[in-house]
Amino acid sequence: MTLIDQAIAARRQRRFQEAEKTCRAAILEQPDNVPALNLLGVLLLETGRAGEAEDVIRKSLEIDPDSPAALHNLGLALGATGRPDQALHYFARAIAGQSDFVDAYYNLGLALQSCGRVEEAAAVYDRAIQLKPDHAHALNNLALIHHGEARLAEAVALYRRALAADPDIETTRANLGSALLILGEREDALAIFREALARNPHDPLSNYVLAQVDYQAMDIDKSTEKLVATLEELRERSDWLRHGSTSSSQIPIYDIPRYREALCAVVDALNAAGIEACLFGGTLLGATRDGDFISFDKDMDFGIFASVTPAQLDAVLSRDPRFRRQTELADDVIISCYKFEDCVAIDFFRLYPEGETVWCGLYWRGQLVKWRHKSFALRDFVFLGVPTKIPEDPEFFLSEVYGDWRTPNPYFAAWASPNMDGGFPPVARCIAYANIFKAAWSGDRPRAIDLCRQLLALDPGNTLVADIRLRLLAAQERVPSGPSATQGAFLGSLEDAFDNLT
């Protein structure tokens, strides 16, 4: 048996150190041994040393520039070191040299997906499935694309095919359940998730989605229990650290010119009716710190004293057909929400004076969460050329809400506001755990790290979250993982109950 045969046998038996040692011996004997160089590259990839793998595979390609296997492996190495855009070229060259190279098609699809070229990725996955109809991962990933495009019936059919091909891919089962939930097939969906937990009681995705079900049913304790299970799984396993890149691509950018138009419409309508309102929340923060709206702030905020009822406010805004009301008109509604031209969300926080303080709040799944401020008067302020009102001491007000308000933070979470009444209520902890899991599992490490920091400021003794933060920080310091894993990608397309605080 040759050295390369011995190395192959050792790899099959997962004796990776022995296989690597044998490969290196073969290369020492024959430096231009292409099979040994390629196998060593694969072993380095499999043991998490993608940078070393790239160097070895490039040496192989210097000897045989058109080897489909080496081209494919170099694409894997580039993807694993956070360069999916460069990996595309090598996967395509591998396919040009071997038109039925299924793995190259699949990994090309992953790289395209990681680069945001979703339509091209779908076509590539489809080709992989034509070549291998039972390719469970390609079926799952194509279904994820349909899932994200709200083509749910097609997604469900593909998920079912993927499960039939490989019933052990736990993420496919979770993806199928989430699609069924959105389709309204609740009982079938819950059966899928319960089956997943029966197969693996630690399955984080199923625990996460079932935590949403409990949250929607206003059982915060059960929801939190399941979320703790998801976080404990993050602490115990390492594969989730490969689930995405380290970019902050999930930070949305909003239509700021439209925000300015909405500002003028709100101020004009309220002034005409003699209703006094002030810039509030993120809108006040942007006006004070940046002199403009914050590009990643998802809505526009106003404070309006509770003596103005929701019905009175609606009577004013409903005169302008560009406003569409999102909330009820009952007197006990504590935040009135509107859409301007169906694109700008506007929240009117009702302000309730109590002694020397004033509070505003939200109902999170039946639990009232209050933010309390020191009582304040209003003063005139010109924002983007529009005369408005703001709290008399805006810097103090912002410090109550944000702490360090001068440092921009696209990851700021409302559940972490320092002026939250009662410190850290159970429903806020529940949402915090959900936010941390979703950001971590989906691959948005910067967001997950910052959310952990915010929670630990409120709960410094939380060793579970502290451990997860340390793992994320350690992963951040290493080379990013690239497009290799799309597990958990359905989280981005799922109608997530934890994202809708109001």
Image: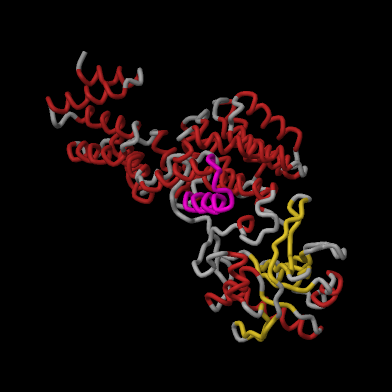
Count all numbered tags in the image, as a single digit: 0
Q: In the rendering, at what x and y percent does residue 57 appear?
A: 25, 37
Q: Residue 309: where, in percent of width, then height? A: 85, 71
Q: Does the magenta stretch include residue 151?
A: no
Residue 157 vertical placement versus 375 (above, below): above
Q: In this view, does 3 lie above or below 194?
A: above
Give x and y (percent) for residue 118: 51, 50
* Residue at 39 percent of width and 37 percent of height: 104
Front in this rendered view, residue 7 or 355: 355
Q: Is the magenta stretch mostly helix, strand or loop?
A: helix
Can you say which quadrant of the picture contains the N terminus?
A: top left
Please check the rendered image and state whether residue 460 is part of the magenta-colored stretch, yes or no. yes
Percent position of residue 412, x then y:
56, 59
Give the answer, above or below, for where 53 lies relative to 261: above
In the figure, 393 relative to 104: above or below?
Answer: below
> Depth check: 113 or 47 in front?
47
Quadrant location of residue 67?
Answer: top left
- Residue 158 visible: no
**Seen in the image, is 318 located left or right of residue 142?**
right
- Looking at the picture, tell me which residue is in the foreground, 380 or 93: 380
> Hey, which quadrant is residue 97 in on the image?
top left
- Quarter of the figure with residue 312: bottom right
Q: Can residue 73 be seen in this view?
A: yes
> What's the magenta region?
445-464
Quadrant showing the C terminus: bottom right
Horizontally, residue 281 falls left or right of residue 266, namely: left
